[in-house]
Image (spheres, rainbow, N blue to C red):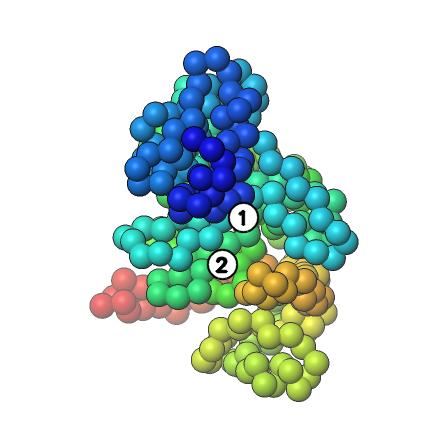
Protein backbone atom coordinates (compact mmCIF):
# COMPACT_ATOMS: atom_id res chain seq x y z
CA UNK A 1 0.00 0.00 0.00
CA UNK A 2 1.42 3.37 -1.01
CA UNK A 3 2.23 6.04 1.62
CA UNK A 4 0.14 8.74 -0.14
CA UNK A 5 -2.91 6.45 -0.11
CA UNK A 6 -2.41 5.81 3.59
CA UNK A 7 -2.40 9.55 4.29
CA UNK A 8 -5.66 10.04 2.36
CA UNK A 9 -7.59 7.11 3.82
CA UNK A 10 -6.27 6.69 7.37
CA UNK A 11 -7.71 8.54 10.38
CA UNK A 12 -4.39 8.26 12.22
CA UNK A 13 -2.44 11.55 12.53
CA UNK A 14 0.18 11.73 9.74
CA UNK A 15 3.13 12.01 12.15
CA UNK A 16 2.15 8.82 13.99
CA UNK A 17 1.51 7.08 10.68
CA UNK A 18 4.91 8.15 9.38
CA UNK A 19 6.65 6.86 12.54
CA UNK A 20 4.80 3.58 12.29
CA UNK A 21 5.81 3.15 8.63
CA UNK A 22 9.43 3.93 9.44
CA UNK A 23 9.33 1.29 12.13
CA UNK A 24 7.84 -1.09 9.63
CA UNK A 25 10.54 -0.33 7.05
CA UNK A 26 13.33 -0.95 9.54
CA UNK A 27 11.63 -3.95 11.15
CA UNK A 28 13.54 -7.14 11.77
CA UNK A 29 12.88 -10.25 9.71
CA UNK A 30 9.45 -11.70 10.38
CA UNK A 31 7.91 -8.42 11.61
CA UNK A 32 5.04 -6.82 9.76
CA UNK A 33 3.05 -3.63 9.34
CA UNK A 34 -0.70 -3.87 8.97
CA UNK A 35 -3.45 -1.35 8.21
CA UNK A 36 -6.86 -2.89 8.84
CA UNK A 37 -10.25 -1.84 7.48
CA UNK A 38 -10.93 0.34 10.55
CA UNK A 39 -7.82 2.41 9.91
CA UNK A 40 -5.83 0.85 12.77
CA UNK A 41 -2.10 0.45 12.28
CA UNK A 42 -0.21 -2.52 13.66
CA UNK A 43 3.56 -2.82 13.67
CA UNK A 44 4.65 -6.29 14.69
CA UNK A 45 0.97 -7.25 15.01
CA UNK A 46 -1.41 -8.38 12.31
CA UNK A 47 -4.45 -7.66 14.48
CA UNK A 48 -4.08 -4.22 16.10
CA UNK A 49 -6.57 -3.49 18.88
CA UNK A 50 -5.87 0.25 19.17
CA UNK A 51 -5.44 3.07 16.63
CA UNK A 52 -1.69 2.50 16.58
CA UNK A 53 -0.20 -0.62 18.10
CA UNK A 54 3.54 -1.26 18.23
CA UNK A 55 4.47 -4.77 19.33
CA UNK A 56 8.23 -4.99 19.62
CA UNK A 57 10.45 -7.88 20.59
CA UNK A 58 13.92 -6.65 21.39
CA UNK A 59 16.84 -7.31 23.69
CA UNK A 60 17.58 -3.59 23.91
CA UNK A 61 16.91 -1.61 27.09
CA UNK A 62 13.91 0.16 25.56
CA UNK A 63 11.40 -0.72 22.88
CA UNK A 64 10.94 2.85 21.63
CA UNK A 65 13.12 5.89 22.28
CA UNK A 66 11.98 9.45 21.57
CA UNK A 67 14.43 12.33 21.70
CA UNK A 68 13.24 15.91 21.41
CA UNK A 69 15.08 19.24 21.54
CA UNK A 70 13.60 22.70 21.49
CA UNK A 71 14.68 26.30 21.43
CA UNK A 72 15.33 28.18 24.66
CA UNK A 73 12.10 29.11 26.43
CA UNK A 74 9.95 26.79 24.31
CA UNK A 75 7.88 23.90 25.63
CA UNK A 76 9.47 20.64 24.56
CA UNK A 77 7.85 17.23 24.80
CA UNK A 78 9.53 13.88 24.35
CA UNK A 79 6.03 12.43 24.29
CA UNK A 80 2.75 14.36 24.37
CA UNK A 81 -0.62 12.69 24.64
CA UNK A 82 -4.10 14.23 24.76
CA UNK A 83 -7.38 12.37 25.21
CA UNK A 84 -10.64 14.25 24.68
CA UNK A 85 -13.16 11.58 23.61
CA UNK A 86 -15.79 10.00 25.81
CA UNK A 87 -15.32 6.79 27.74
CA UNK A 88 -15.53 5.26 31.16
CA UNK A 89 -11.81 5.68 31.77
CA UNK A 90 -9.41 7.94 29.88
CA UNK A 91 -5.64 7.77 30.20
CA UNK A 92 -3.33 10.38 28.71
CA UNK A 93 -0.52 7.90 29.26
CA UNK A 94 -0.95 4.40 30.63
CA UNK A 95 2.00 2.24 31.63
CA UNK A 96 2.09 -1.35 32.80
CA UNK A 97 5.03 -3.52 33.80
CA UNK A 98 4.24 -7.11 34.73
CA UNK A 99 7.25 -9.28 33.93
CA UNK A 100 9.38 -11.09 36.51
CA UNK A 101 12.05 -8.40 36.58
CA UNK A 102 13.95 -7.17 39.62
CA UNK A 103 11.87 -3.97 39.64
CA UNK A 104 8.80 -3.04 37.63
CA UNK A 105 7.69 0.55 37.03
CA UNK A 106 4.37 1.23 35.37
CA UNK A 107 5.57 4.80 35.00
CA UNK A 108 8.90 6.39 35.86
CA UNK A 109 9.96 10.02 35.63
CA UNK A 110 13.29 11.78 36.02
CA UNK A 111 13.94 15.51 35.82
CA UNK A 112 17.32 17.19 36.23
CA UNK A 113 19.19 20.28 35.09
CA UNK A 114 16.51 22.97 35.43
CA UNK A 115 15.89 25.53 38.15
CA UNK A 116 12.83 23.55 39.21
CA UNK A 117 12.60 19.85 38.37
CA UNK A 118 9.52 17.64 38.58
CA UNK A 119 9.96 13.90 38.25
CA UNK A 120 6.20 13.59 38.00
CA UNK A 121 3.64 16.36 37.64
CA UNK A 122 -0.11 15.86 37.76
CA UNK A 123 -3.10 18.19 37.38
CA UNK A 124 -6.71 17.25 38.05
CA UNK A 125 -9.35 19.89 37.45
CA UNK A 126 -12.94 18.67 37.60
CA UNK A 127 -15.22 16.20 39.32
CA UNK A 128 -13.45 14.17 41.97
CA UNK A 129 -10.00 15.57 41.24
CA UNK A 130 -6.87 13.70 42.37
CA UNK A 131 -3.54 15.16 41.27
CA UNK A 132 -1.63 12.00 42.20
CA UNK A 133 -3.26 8.67 42.96
CA UNK A 134 -1.49 5.66 44.37
CA UNK A 135 -2.83 2.28 45.43
CA UNK A 136 -0.79 -0.75 46.49
CA UNK A 137 -2.89 -3.87 45.92
CA UNK A 138 -0.50 -6.66 46.81
CA UNK A 139 3.04 -7.34 47.88
CA UNK A 140 5.07 -8.03 51.00
CA UNK A 141 5.55 -4.33 51.80
CA UNK A 142 3.05 -1.94 50.27
CA UNK A 143 3.15 1.83 49.81
CA UNK A 144 0.34 3.63 48.03
CA UNK A 145 2.68 6.62 47.64
CA UNK A 146 6.32 6.66 48.68
CA UNK A 147 8.37 9.82 48.89
CA UNK A 148 11.84 10.41 50.27
CA UNK A 149 14.79 12.77 50.32
CA UNK A 150 18.49 11.97 50.63
CA UNK A 151 20.39 13.45 53.59
CA UNK A 152 17.33 15.36 54.87
CA UNK A 153 17.92 18.79 56.32
CA UNK A 154 16.04 22.04 56.74
CA UNK A 155 13.06 22.33 54.37
CA UNK A 156 13.55 18.80 53.02
CA UNK A 157 10.40 16.70 53.03
CA UNK A 158 9.63 13.17 51.91
CA UNK A 159 6.03 14.36 51.62
CA UNK A 160 4.98 18.02 51.44
CA UNK A 161 1.31 18.96 51.65
CA UNK A 162 -0.03 22.31 50.48
CA UNK A 163 -3.24 22.27 52.53
CA UNK A 164 -4.78 20.01 55.15
CA UNK A 165 -3.83 16.37 55.67
CA UNK A 166 -6.30 13.61 56.56
CA UNK A 167 -5.84 9.95 57.29
CA UNK A 168 -8.21 7.13 58.20
CA UNK A 169 -5.30 5.34 59.85
CA UNK A 170 -2.60 6.54 62.22
CA UNK A 171 0.43 8.80 61.94
CA UNK A 172 3.45 6.96 63.32
CA UNK A 173 6.86 8.50 63.94
CA UNK A 174 9.91 6.23 64.02
CA UNK A 175 11.14 6.05 67.64
CA UNK A 176 13.32 2.93 67.80
CA UNK A 177 15.92 3.26 70.57
CA UNK A 178 18.56 1.57 68.41
CA UNK A 179 18.66 4.68 66.23
CA UNK A 180 18.99 7.15 69.12
CA UNK A 181 22.04 8.49 70.91
CA UNK A 182 22.70 10.75 73.94
CA UNK A 183 19.39 9.83 75.61
CA UNK A 184 18.73 11.85 78.78
CA UNK A 185 15.89 13.31 80.81
CA UNK A 186 14.22 16.58 79.88
CA UNK A 187 16.02 19.54 81.55
CA UNK A 188 14.13 21.78 83.95
CA UNK A 189 14.69 24.85 81.78
CA UNK A 190 12.85 23.15 78.90
CA UNK A 191 9.89 22.35 81.15
CA UNK A 192 9.81 25.87 82.59
CA UNK A 193 10.08 27.23 79.05
CA UNK A 194 6.89 25.48 78.01
CA UNK A 195 5.13 26.67 81.16
CA UNK A 196 6.17 30.23 80.28
CA UNK A 197 4.84 30.06 76.72
CA UNK A 198 1.54 31.59 75.68
CA UNK A 199 -1.14 29.26 74.32
CA UNK A 200 -3.31 31.16 71.86
CA UNK A 201 -6.70 31.09 70.15
CA UNK A 202 -6.57 32.51 66.62
CA UNK A 203 -7.57 32.22 62.98
CA UNK A 204 -5.41 32.20 59.89
CA UNK A 205 -5.42 35.20 57.55
CA UNK A 206 -7.72 35.16 54.54
CA UNK A 207 -6.38 35.31 50.98
CA UNK A 208 -7.21 39.03 50.80
CA UNK A 209 -5.43 39.71 54.09
CA UNK A 210 -2.36 37.79 52.95
CA UNK A 211 -2.24 39.71 49.68
CA UNK A 212 -2.55 43.02 51.52
CA UNK A 213 0.39 41.99 53.72
CA UNK A 214 2.53 41.04 50.74
CA UNK A 215 2.34 37.31 51.57
CA UNK A 216 1.41 34.51 49.15
CA UNK A 217 -1.83 32.59 49.39
CA UNK A 218 -1.08 29.50 51.42
CA UNK A 219 -4.22 27.30 51.48
CA UNK A 220 -4.56 27.86 55.23
CA UNK A 221 -7.14 26.19 57.44
CA UNK A 222 -10.32 28.13 58.11
CA UNK A 223 -12.11 28.59 61.41
CA UNK A 224 -10.84 29.04 64.95
CA UNK A 225 -7.52 27.35 65.74
CA UNK A 226 -5.53 26.74 68.93
CA UNK A 227 -1.77 26.67 69.23
CA UNK A 228 1.26 28.88 69.70
CA UNK A 229 2.91 31.74 67.80
CA UNK A 230 6.26 30.52 66.50
CA UNK A 231 8.02 33.85 67.04
CA UNK A 232 7.03 33.76 70.73
CA UNK A 233 7.89 30.08 71.09
CA UNK A 234 11.40 30.82 69.82
CA UNK A 235 12.07 32.72 73.05
CA UNK A 236 11.22 29.77 75.31
CA UNK A 237 11.76 26.62 73.22
CA UNK A 238 13.86 27.46 70.17
CA UNK A 239 14.57 23.76 69.55
CA UNK A 240 10.92 23.24 68.61
CA UNK A 241 10.80 26.12 66.14
CA UNK A 242 12.05 25.43 62.63
CA UNK A 243 12.74 27.58 59.60
CA UNK A 244 10.55 26.34 56.77
CA UNK A 245 9.99 27.21 53.15
CA UNK A 246 6.39 27.71 52.12
CA UNK A 247 6.31 26.35 48.57
CA UNK A 248 3.31 27.26 46.44
CA UNK A 249 3.05 25.59 43.04
CA UNK A 250 0.46 27.25 40.77
CA UNK A 251 -2.14 24.69 39.60
CA UNK A 252 -1.44 25.67 36.00
CA UNK A 253 0.73 23.68 33.63
CA UNK A 254 1.79 26.92 31.89
CA UNK A 255 2.97 28.57 35.14
CA UNK A 256 5.21 26.11 36.94
CA UNK A 257 7.34 28.71 38.71
CA UNK A 258 6.78 28.08 42.44
CA UNK A 259 6.44 30.81 45.04
CA UNK A 260 8.94 30.36 47.89
CA UNK A 261 8.47 32.16 51.20
CA UNK A 262 10.52 31.66 54.34
CA UNK A 263 8.28 30.89 57.33
CA UNK A 264 8.49 29.51 60.87
CA UNK A 265 6.97 26.21 62.01
CA UNK A 266 6.49 24.45 65.35
CA UNK A 267 7.12 20.78 66.03
CA UNK A 268 3.95 20.17 68.03
CA UNK A 269 4.55 16.42 68.36
CA UNK A 270 7.61 16.97 70.54
CA UNK A 271 5.60 19.06 72.97
CA UNK A 272 4.05 15.79 74.21
CA UNK A 273 7.08 14.37 76.10
CA UNK A 274 7.71 17.79 77.68
CA UNK A 275 4.10 17.89 78.89
CA UNK A 276 4.41 14.36 80.25
CA UNK A 277 7.57 15.36 82.16
CA UNK A 278 5.74 18.38 83.63
CA UNK A 279 2.81 16.22 84.73
CA UNK A 280 5.20 13.71 86.30
CA UNK A 281 6.87 16.53 88.27
CA UNK A 282 3.50 17.83 89.42
CA UNK A 283 2.40 14.35 90.43
CA UNK A 284 5.56 13.88 92.49
CA UNK A 285 4.88 17.22 94.21
CA UNK A 286 1.28 16.21 94.94
CA UNK A 287 2.37 12.91 96.45
CA UNK A 288 5.05 14.63 98.56
CA UNK A 289 2.46 17.08 99.88
CA UNK A 290 0.06 14.24 100.67
CA UNK A 291 2.79 12.47 102.63
CA UNK A 292 3.57 15.64 104.57
CA UNK A 293 -0.10 16.28 105.38
CA UNK A 294 -0.59 12.72 106.58
CA UNK A 295 2.58 13.05 108.66
CA UNK A 296 0.98 16.02 110.39
CA UNK A 297 -1.91 13.79 111.44
CA UNK A 298 -4.40 15.18 108.96
CA UNK A 299 -6.61 12.66 107.19
CA UNK A 300 -6.98 13.02 103.44
CA UNK A 301 -10.01 11.84 101.49
CA UNK A 302 -9.49 8.54 99.74
CA UNK A 303 -8.67 9.27 96.08
CA UNK A 304 -10.92 6.46 94.88
CA UNK A 305 -13.84 7.86 96.89
CA UNK A 306 -13.26 11.28 95.35
CA UNK A 307 -13.63 9.84 91.88
CA UNK A 308 -17.00 8.19 92.60
- Whether residue 83 is visible here, answered yes or no, is yes
Front label number (2 vs 1)? 1
Q: Which residue is denoted by mark 1 in the rendering?
A: 80
Q: Is residue 79 above or below residue 46?
A: below
Q: Quadrant of the C terminus?
A: bottom left
User: Residue 52: x and y, percent?
Assistant: 41, 37
Along the line of sight, the residue nearer the viewer: 6 or 152? 6
User: Residue 296: x and y, percent?
Assistant: 45, 67
Q: Which residue is denoted by mark 2 in the rendering?
A: 123
Q: Residue furthest top?
A: 29
- Whether residue 196 is visible here, answered yes or no, is no
Going 31% across and 64% down the picture, which residue do you hit? 303
Q: Relative to 43, is 195 on the left or the right?
A: right
Q: Quadrant of the N terminus?
A: top left
Q: CA distance from mark 2 to mark 1?
A: 15 Å
Disc 1: CA contacts within 10 A as few (<14), some (14-19) or many (>=20)? few
Along the line of sight, the residue nearer the viewer: 179 or 6? 6
Q: Earlier in the sequence, mark 2 or mark 1?
A: 1
Going 68% across and 84% down the picture, which residue do you hit? 213
User: Residue 211: x and y, percent?
Assistant: 64, 82
Q: Is residue 19 above or below residue 87?
A: above
Along the line of sight, the residue nearer the viewer: 109 or 306? 109
In terms of secondary structure, where does tag 2 sit?
Answer: loop
The circle on residue 114 is none
Going 50% across and 31% down the picture, which residue do you hit? 21
Q: Relative to 151, is 162 on the left or the right?
A: left
Q: Residue furthest right?
A: 72
In terms of secondary structure, where does tag 1 sit?
Answer: loop
User: Residue 162: x and y, percent?
Assistant: 54, 63
Amino acid sequence: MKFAHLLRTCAIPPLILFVAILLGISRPAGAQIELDSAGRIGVGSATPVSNTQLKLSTSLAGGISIFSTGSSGADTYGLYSSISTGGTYQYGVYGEASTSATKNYGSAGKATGATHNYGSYGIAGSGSAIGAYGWALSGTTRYGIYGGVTSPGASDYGVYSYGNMYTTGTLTQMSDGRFKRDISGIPDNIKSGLLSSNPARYRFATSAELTASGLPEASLSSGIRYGFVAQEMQVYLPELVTNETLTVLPPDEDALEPSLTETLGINYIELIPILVAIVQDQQAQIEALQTAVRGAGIELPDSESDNK
